[in-house]
Image: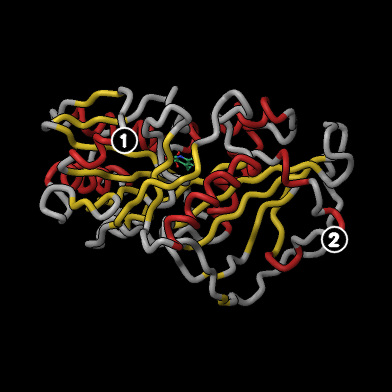
Amino acid sequence: MCYGRPTARKVTAPKRRRARLVQPKSGPSVPFEAPRFIWWDGRIHAWDDASVHVSRLQWSALGAPFEAMRAYFDPASSTSFVFGLDAHLRRMAHSMRVMEIREPSIETLREATLEVLRRNGARADEYIRIFAWFEDGAAYTTEQPTHAFVLSRTFPSRLAEDFSWTASVVSWRRLDETTVPVRVKAAANYQNSRLAALEALRNGYDFGVLLNARGEVTEGPRECIFLVLDGVLVTPPLSAPVLDSITRRAVLRIATHLGIPVVERVVLRGELYEATEMLACSTASEIVPVVSVDKVVLGTGRPGPVTTRIRELFREVVYGRVELLADLRTAVSKP
Ligand code: PMP
């Protein structure tokens, strides 16, 4: 790793700047407010000091593993909780191993995540991005120096908002293991997601559902999917394939806690239209009710009772207001 490449300037906090960040509707669109600090290559930097020369951004993102997490700030207890910190870091370790990027260590990234939250104040809901990449060079080697950053920025939860999405099945098929390892979160895999999200948006929907090569349901561009079919919560298995999502795992545990029958099994396309409820879930999108697929209205066309119960309890969980899933919460110590 190239520690020390950035100039060793004194770390001073620049003023916050606002800029519009345009995102597909399949993820929440939040104005980007630059945080004061970022962790880059081994230490905390002031936001404006963390830059690389454009010439290094060529093939470098191809092999880049990354993670996204959220920290939830509970004003009542004045505590910020990272949700699923160790689970996300385990997945990062897996992605790094497969992409053959060896540094930094997961322990370093764990400490960096907590440190960047502490330094930025962590008194709001935050979105955290970990990104590791090879410096530009020959595309197909692993010999180049590597870099990594941990960025946290304010990103309010939408769990208390009453909104829903419309979905369509997109024409692009989900990547599968015959071409790339789909269980890793690597930047290059996301061209598939991007095309799917853009197709759905262009056609006037909020969310695109990807099928696999056999025509079975997999997931969204960056969200896993659950359906309610005959009162049972059904989700495609990891082998569909879908990403081994931390939120998906949490939804499975919450549903079990609520006594809702759950099953992981192959989901056929036609079942999308039979469902009385559907929800999409991920770190960025949290839990979102989906009220129609290809203009076929699901249930009443409003967020249904199963989705609502799961979403409400998920909200209590992430803010640390219930004991449930305490193993997934890491409190950020005060600066
Ligand atoms: N599927 C895909 C393809 C994703 O990129 C994501 C976001 N990481 C998810 C599902 C949801 O995963 P998680 O709950 O871990 O954010």
- Where residue 311 sits: x, y (%)? 23, 47
Answer with mark 2 or mark 1, whichever residue precedes in sequence. 2
Residue 261 left/right relative to 212: left
- Where residue 108 sits: x, y (%)? 66, 37
Residue occupying the point 54% across, 69% down: 21
- In terms of secondary structure, where does tag 1 sit? helix
Q: Residues within 10 Å of mark 2 (few under 14, many from 20)?
A: few
Q: Which mark is residue 269?
A: 1
Residue 158 left/right relative to 220: left
Q: Is there any visible trace of residue 8 in the rendered image?
A: no
Type of amino acid at the residue the image marks with label 1:
Arg
- Where residue 147 sits: x, y (%)? 77, 45
The front one of 261 and 52 is 261
The total of numbered circles placed on residues is 2
Q: What distance separates the C-alpha of mark 2 from that of mark 1? A: 46 Å
Q: In which image quadrant can residue 179 be found? A: top right
Q: Residues within 10 Å of mark 1 (few under 14, many from 20)?
A: some
Residue occupying the point 40% across, 49% down: 208
Whether the residues at callouts 2 and 1 have beta carbons within 8 Å, the answer is no
Disc number lying in front (2 or 1): 1
- Where residue 142 sits: x, y (%)? 83, 31
For disc 2, the marked residue is: 53
Residue 249, placed above or below residue 48: above
The front one of 225 and 64 is 225
Visual colour scheme: secondary structure
Residue 278 left/right relative to 41: left
Q: Is there any visible trace of residue 56 in the rendered image?
A: yes
The front one of 217 and 310 is 217
Type of amino acid at the residue the image marks with label 2:
His
Q: Is mark 1 within 8 Å of ligand 1?
A: no
Residue occupying the point 79% across, 41% down: 134
